[in-house]
Amino acid sequence: MPNENPSAQEWLTGLAAEMGLPSPSAEEIENLLNLAGVAAHSSERIAAPIACWMVGVAKIDPEEALAMVQKYENGRVS
């Protein structure tokens, strides 16, 4: 194993290969990071990784999931 830490994209690509999954696209990563940001800033920070996990379990596309999270947050604070 190399001594240098891989970039996030390299790390995710390696993990995806280990899991037998395609690597996440730049757009999917951006949507998940935005989703995590909404969760982390709307609740305790631990909500971010758990929300992303829930998206994976539900097999929801990250773009659709981000829209759902934004809709939930907008309705929750209205």
Image (cartoon, rainbow, N blue to C red):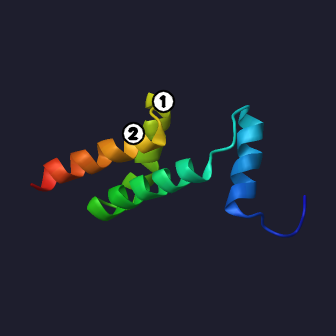
**Of residues 31 and 56, the one drawn nearer to the viewer in this rendering:** 31
Position of 22 relative to 1 (above/below): above
Horizontal side of residue 36 vs 1, given as left or right = left
Mark 2 is surrounded, within 10 Å at the Cα level, by few (under 14), some (14 to 19) or many (20 or more) other residues, namely few
Left/right placement of residue 37 relative to residue 6 reads: left
Where does the image place residue 25, in percent across and percent down from the top left? 62, 47
- Tell me where residue 54 appears, x and y as whole percent: 42, 38
Give me the disc on residue 64. Answer: 2
Residue 19 coordinates in the image, percent (x, y) = 71, 35
In the picture, the quarter occupied by the C terminus is bottom left
Give the residue type that dot 1 points to: Lys
Image spot of residue 36 (x, y percent): 42, 56
Q: Are marks 2 and 1 in contact (CB under 8 Å)?
A: no
**19 and 62: which is toward the camera:** 62
Of residue 59 and residue 30, the one placed in the foreground of this image is: 30
Instruction: Give the numbered dot on residue 44.
Output: none
- Mark 2 → mark 1, Cα distance in angstroms: 10 Å
Location of residue 21 (image quadrant): top right
Q: Secondary structure at mark 1?
A: loop
Q: Residue at x 73, y 48 (%)?
A: 13
**Residue at the spot of label 1:** 59
Image point 63% across, 45% down: which residue?
24
